[in-house]
């Protein structure tokens, strides 16, 4: 199943990204730069991703204006770009091809042994782990990941063309456009109900996603998730399963966690491979098993794959250690839906069972808070304290003003923890230090800019 020949390099193009600093767009722009293409882009707000892209050679405009479109071959947009965007209107008026970012990504992976990673949570770390494993096995994959891989300080890798690994975002349904060799599915939970409307529609979309894979290669599924088992029925594809359950083709046993390190034995057919992973939590063991499963599916050396886990550097904002002190540790995580929040807290609780855990959470999107309210209030089990910040809107306007005081009260009741409100990040950092009895873990969780609280804590604790 491993490709022996490299596909011809794609034609060099001039491309313009509208919203170049946004999630999912900056990585594609960086990959295009790595291919030697000419890249321009625009955004309305400055950020670190935008500055990095500019340093790598892109021409960036801090506005959306028709005059930003120079001599270009195509325009790339995301679902966040409105139909009346002046650059989009100019492109259509001039007859310049407009590609959704998913179409751009689909083109990048065409012709390679490709792997897409989908699931409600765990996608980014799993995609990065698969990329790391394949690289360690000598496969030299290209990759587009939804977070910064800390070993290369980038969300992308430009490979040699034989392999490609990509995170497949289900939020807008565009993950059904890809035609991967292998489709990986980590889990299926209730999320993005504002787009799908019902959990049944979400399950149907993931079922269709599995059927986008190569009929001869198939799918890699986390068998511990009952909904994954449900949606993988009737796909008429080979299926490779991983997890903790007896019967999985790739299974983990003898799991032990000490601080930021987890050890386990991976059972791959008849092989028993002792693994060391520099990450905490059973959910990260599952992510690592996905990497071993992909190596096995491609016929690569699973022993090398297992050994490579020890050198995985991690991903920015995925249980990233900001302060590592004996008395107070600060960990930042992107967790923004209930499953991710609970997995993060559970991992920290298993690693440091006697520590007080204070969670600083910034709810992400009014629509997510509304559609997942009951799941959200029960997702903080295991935390000693929860500090709530105002909702990070991500461009949304609230239908009604959210009752955050009521949310705090409901979290206290449903998750058996002490939940309080804070109006800003500085107040949240001060309150976290006041509430946290030593030894303590302070978690900053959310997909917005709650990471700034972790930086404030670092300045207060380390200087």
Image (spheres, rainbow, N blue to C red):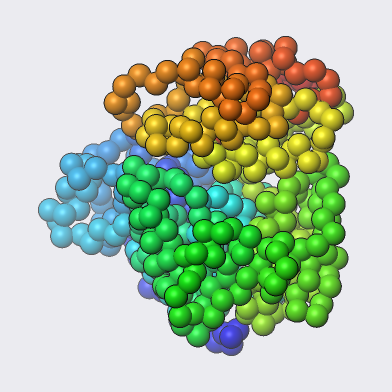
Looking at the picture, tell me which residue is in the foreground, 114 or 342.
Answer: 342
- The answer to whether residue 282 is above or below residue 292 is above
Residue occupying image coordinates x 44% and y 50%:
24
Please report the residue visible at 60 percent of the width from the left and 12 percent of the height from the top: 427
Residue 26 horizontal/vertical position (percent): 45, 49
Could one spot residue 443 in this view of the protein? Answer: no
Relative to 57, 174 lies left or right: left
Q: Residue at x 74, y 38 (%)?
A: 348
Number of marks:
0
Q: Nearer the viewer, residue 459 or 438?
A: 438
Name the residue at 49% across, 80% down.
Answer: 237
As rendered, which of 136 and 296 lies closer to the eye? 296
Q: Is residue 370 above or below residue 139?
A: above
Question: Which quadrant would residue 184 be assigned to in this image?
Answer: bottom right
Can you tell which quarter of the image residue 451 is in? top right
Residue 25 lies left or right of residue 71; in this view the side is: right
Q: Residue 385, percent across and down?
A: 67, 21
Q: Quadrant of the C terminus?
A: top right
Q: Is residue 407 above or below residue 27?
A: above
- Residue 250: x and y in percent read 71, 71
Percent position of residue 266, x then y: 78, 67
| Residue 296: quarter of image | bottom right
Please indicate whether residue 103 sits to the left or right of residue 247 in the image: left
Asked if residue 243 lies left or right of residue 393, the reply is right
Q: Quadrant of the N terminus?
A: bottom right
**Residue 266 in view in this figure:** yes
As rendered, which of 327 and 55 lies closer to the eye? 327
């Amino acid at each position: 199943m491993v490709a022996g020949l490299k596909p011809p390099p794609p034609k060099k193009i001039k491309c313009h990204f509208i919203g170049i600093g946004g999630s999912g767009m900056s990585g594609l722009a960086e990959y295009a730069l790595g291919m030697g293409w000419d890249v321009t882009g625009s955004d309305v707000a400055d950020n670190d991703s935008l500055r990095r892209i500019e340093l790598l050679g892109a021409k960036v405009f801090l506005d959306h204006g028709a005059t930003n479109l120079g001599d270009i071959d195509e325009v790339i947009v995301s679902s966040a770009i409105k139909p009346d965007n002046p650059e989009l209107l100019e492109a259509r008026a001039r007859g310049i091809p407009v590609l959704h970012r998913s179409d751009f990504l689909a083109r990048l992976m065409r012709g390679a042994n490709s792997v897409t990673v989908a699931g409600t949570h765990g996608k980014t770390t799993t995609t990065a782990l698969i990329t790391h494993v394949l690289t360690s096995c000598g496969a030299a994959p290209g990759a587009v990941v939804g977070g910064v891989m800390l070993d290369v300080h980038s969300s992308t890798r430009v490979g040699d063309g034989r392999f490609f690994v990509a995170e497949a975002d289900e939020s807008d349904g565009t993950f059904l456009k890809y035609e991967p060799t292998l489709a990986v599915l980590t889990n299926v939970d209730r999320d993005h109900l504002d787009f799908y409307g019902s959990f049944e529609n979400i399950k149907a979309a993931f079922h269709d996603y599995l059927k986008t894979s190569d009929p001869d290669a198939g799918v890699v599924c986390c068998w511990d998730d009952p909904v994954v088992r449900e949606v993988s029925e009737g796909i008429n594809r080979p299926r490779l399963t991983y997890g903790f359950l007896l019967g999985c083709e790739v299974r983990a046993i003898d799991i032990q966690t000490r601080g930021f390190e987890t050890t386990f034995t991976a059972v791959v057919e008849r092989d028993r491979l002792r693994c060391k992973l520099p990450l905490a939590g059973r959910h990260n063991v599952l992510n690592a098993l996905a990497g071993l499963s992909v190596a096995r599916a491609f016929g690569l050396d699973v022993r090398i794959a297992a050994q490579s886990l020890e050198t995985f550097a991690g991903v920015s904002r995925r249980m990233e250690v900001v302060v590592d002190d004996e008395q107070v540790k600060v960990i930042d995580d992107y967790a923004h839906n209930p499953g991710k929040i609970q997995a993060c807290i559970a991992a920290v609780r298993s690693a440091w069972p006697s520590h007080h855990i204070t969670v600083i959470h910034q709810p992400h999107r009014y629509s997510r808070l509304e559609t997942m309210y009951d799941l959200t209030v029960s997702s903080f089990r295991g935390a000693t304290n929860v500090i709530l910040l105002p909702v990070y809107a991500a461009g949304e306007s609230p239908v009604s003003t959210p009752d955050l005081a009521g949310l705090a009260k409901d979290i206290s009741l449903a998750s058996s923890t002490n939940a309080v409100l804070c109006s800003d990040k500085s107040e949240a950092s001060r309150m976290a230090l006041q509430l946290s009895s030593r030894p303590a873990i302070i978690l900053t969780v959310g997909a917005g800019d709650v990471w700034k609280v972790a930086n404030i804590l670092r300045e207060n604790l380390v200087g």
